[in-house]
Amino acid sequence: GGGPTDVDAMLRSTQILTTAFHPSQQYWPGVQRIEPVLTAEARNDRGAGLLQSGAQNGMPLWSLGLNGSGVVLATADSGLDLDHACFRDGVAVVGTPGPDHRKVVLLNTSVDGNDTPGHDDYRHGTHTAGTLGCEPVDWNRSDGPGQGVSLAHGARLVVADIVNGSGWVPPSFDELLSEAALQGAVVHAHSWGDDTTEYTARSEALDRWSLEHPWTLAFIAPGNGGTVLEPANALNAVAVGATTVATPDERWVGSPEGPTVFDTDGIGLLAPGSHIVSAKADGDLDSMNGDWRGSSGTSMATPMAAAAAGVVQQMIEQGWIHGGESSEATLNLSEQAPAWANPEQTGMAWVAQGWTPSGPMLRATLALSAEPLPAEHANGGAGPAGLSNPHDGWGQPRLDRLLMPSYADDAWDMAPHVVLHDAYRLLNTSPEEMLQARLNASGGSARLDESPWNGSGALGPFLAEGERYLRTFELRPGEDFEVRMAYPSLGGQAVDDLVLHVHLDDGRTATSGIDFAGASVLSEDVASPERSNETLRGVRVLAADLINVSSVTVEVLARHVVPGNLPGFLGADGDRIGFALAVMGANRGAPGPLDADGDGVVDQDDACGAEPGGAIDLDQDGCPDDRDMDGVDDVDDTCPDEDARFADMDEDGCLDDGDDDGVPDHLDACPTTVPDSLWPTLADGCRPTDAPPVVEAFVPNADLSPGEVLEVHVLVRDADGDGGTLSASLTIDGVPISISLQRHTGLGAYVMAWNASEWAVPWIVDGSSIDVILTFETTNGSPEATEEVVMLVDALQAEYFDPPAIDSEVGGTTSFRPVMLAGLLLVLLVALTQWRGGSERDPASPRDPFVLSSRPDEEAE
């Protein structure tokens, strides 16, 4: 036993006591832990190595030039010592922050203008900014990285000083975030907050902004010790716990843990946060200093994790990892690699067209890259349970998991095992341009929701409640299959709920939130997990469970979307929501120009990417030719030069002509005309209208005496000029007189006359009735010839049909009876003349119901 004779419990500075050590000494009363004396080393680059490869000295991403180049990162803190070597524009030049500055795009000094001695947390802001993006100005990258170099040393910064003589005075989140976003920042690092675990108005403001402007990902320090503090408890933020650099498999002793008041894990990721060496402020803006200092806490881990997000953003924007789109071998790895590096991959690499990733896309991809702590340290020492937990979150990023280089077609395919889908991917504009337009329309960042967005111009889809997104992936043999899905949600009590399913082709399904021992539980049924406020979901199916599985289908189900007042819109007042997917273990497909429909036209030139061009694609636009633009491809179009959109029920590409008269149905006024080559139709599809023959007849002398000539004057007219035969005959008391028949051919005026020998002798007696029967048979042979004859008698004009209708009230000198004879083209018109001798017939009892009595001495009834 034994130990030092004197122990000062109030030591305020580190003192080294040299004594013999025995294991029993670790149990001295009052001794919490005993640490060996180690050689102090710079830690930013060591932490960067851990986040790249899991090893302090392993820097595979840096050796490939993946260092945040081209990315803008944002932070707000106690200020910035701008003349420090990490940030100044030249070796002996501070420079003015702006678009042309080497490191600082914007420095907001409206609250204070320096990382000022005497202010709260003096040097805190310069240190965290160095961890976020330090690249010493005197490092020319010919030598290996050294003291203080940030994981994202190629990035540039937006910095806001939010501490003055009165303390921390942060503006509203929408002001901070919008200012940085207009400079192109998606990733924000904030190592501050209030000492409360409540979900505050600041937490809600962060969630609301992240939903309205989804190109936002805020990394927030959750405090040191205890549970997660605000605003790190925001649903759309990443609260970063800390690990140690010397023992990276363990959490730092001061790292807080969840859950939050909303029963979420709270901690999103871990990052090195113990004894992080970074830029040291000296309070002098002209000293051109380059000193370093070490510090520990989640304040240090937070910019470390944010820097990792900056590297992932570069990978997406440069097209290293993508969604399986067309790629080209245009990235020269040899030129991009720093001079100090000797990467295994040199020459050209395949890259796709990149995009500015949304916050959910970065969040999902970082979580996909993360490795859980070893079982003995995971989950507070309880061992792995779910894929994430309140102690470790999803684990610590290891970015080289996103790379699996393979050589294909004379170039490197750097990530064939990773597939991304970002519904918020903008296709024809940038997040900065869209935000500026919405700010102009709404009048300010606090009113961004007054200029709502419906998702137009983005990849989508954006899901309403009950809708789902499905995508099938081929598996890579022998590898785990992992998916991370993230989405922005409104905070407070209104939380959206999206569920992730992975359906195996053997019928089993894994569902987010149903995990055991660090892997998803497979079920024969599709499970419905309990409602959760988490906005990052995941599935991990182990390779051992995929031995006989070749493909899986990923499903994103919008189980609940908080309804707003604007159907079809996104944001706080909409009813649709986007998401991002990051997949590992899938076969993304061969690199090169993508030809998804296999028609020989690469997708980037294919106007119909999901439809093969087919046998006729003369213009090589990837679409089946349809030169008459009628919707029937030329290969199937019987009439390829005729636009049949107006009438093409059989979809043969020809205008329908049901009656085969040469007039298309949509122009045919008579679409059911029976064809007749002898009688063609007119341009309107109808045959000429047949005007009915008109027969005018009158009897000069209706009161005949025996021996007089019976005359009937007849005029036959036909507006069409159709000819015909006029016939006239007599009946006496209903008995036909055959010798009385007369015929005249053609149109014109005729006098039909019968002498007494034909009508009077020997047929007539006192009171006999004489009927004059007129018929006209047209010679018009058209199928459309009318069966109508118009009979005019004196001032009387009537039309007769089959059956005819006769006005019984018309007066005149003659009565008429219509008669229809057999024969298709035979139309008969009958005029009846009554002759009366000494006695009259009873007008109340006509001898034929069609006879109209119009006797000279009676009025019509």
Image (spheres, rainbow, N blue to C red):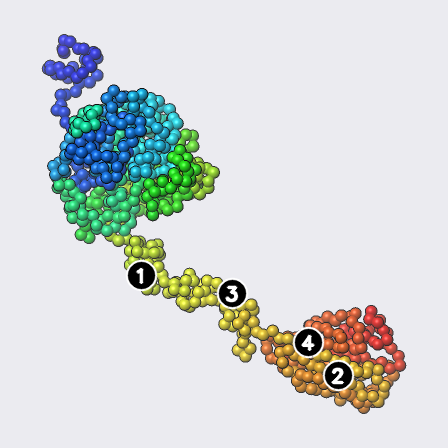
What secondary structure is marked by label 4? strand
Q: Which of the labelled discs sits on residue 789, or is there none? A: 4
Report, in whole angstroms, how far the alpha carbon at label 4 lies from the one at label 3. Answer: 33 Å
Name the residue that disc number 1 marks.
620
Instruction: Say whether disc 2 or disc 1 marks the residue closer to the N-terminus.
Output: 1
Q: Residue at x 69, y 86 (%)?
A: 744
- Callout 3, which amino acid? His
Instruction: Say whether disc 1 or disc 4 marks the residue closer to the N-terminus.
Output: 1
> 191 or 99, which lies in front?
99
For the residue carrying disc 1, how many other residues have a C-alpha within 10 Å: few (<14), some (14-19), or many (20+)? some
Q: Which quarter of the rendered picture does the N terminus lie within?
A: top left
Name the residue that disc number 3 marks.
666
- Callout 1, which amino acid? Gln
For the residue carrying disc 4, how many other residues have a C-alpha within 10 Å: few (<14), some (14-19), or many (20+)? many
Foreground label between 2 and 1: 2
For the residue carrying disc 2, how many other residues have a C-alpha within 10 Å: few (<14), some (14-19), or many (20+)? some
Instruction: Say whether disc 4 or disc 3 marks the residue closer to the N-terminus.
Output: 3
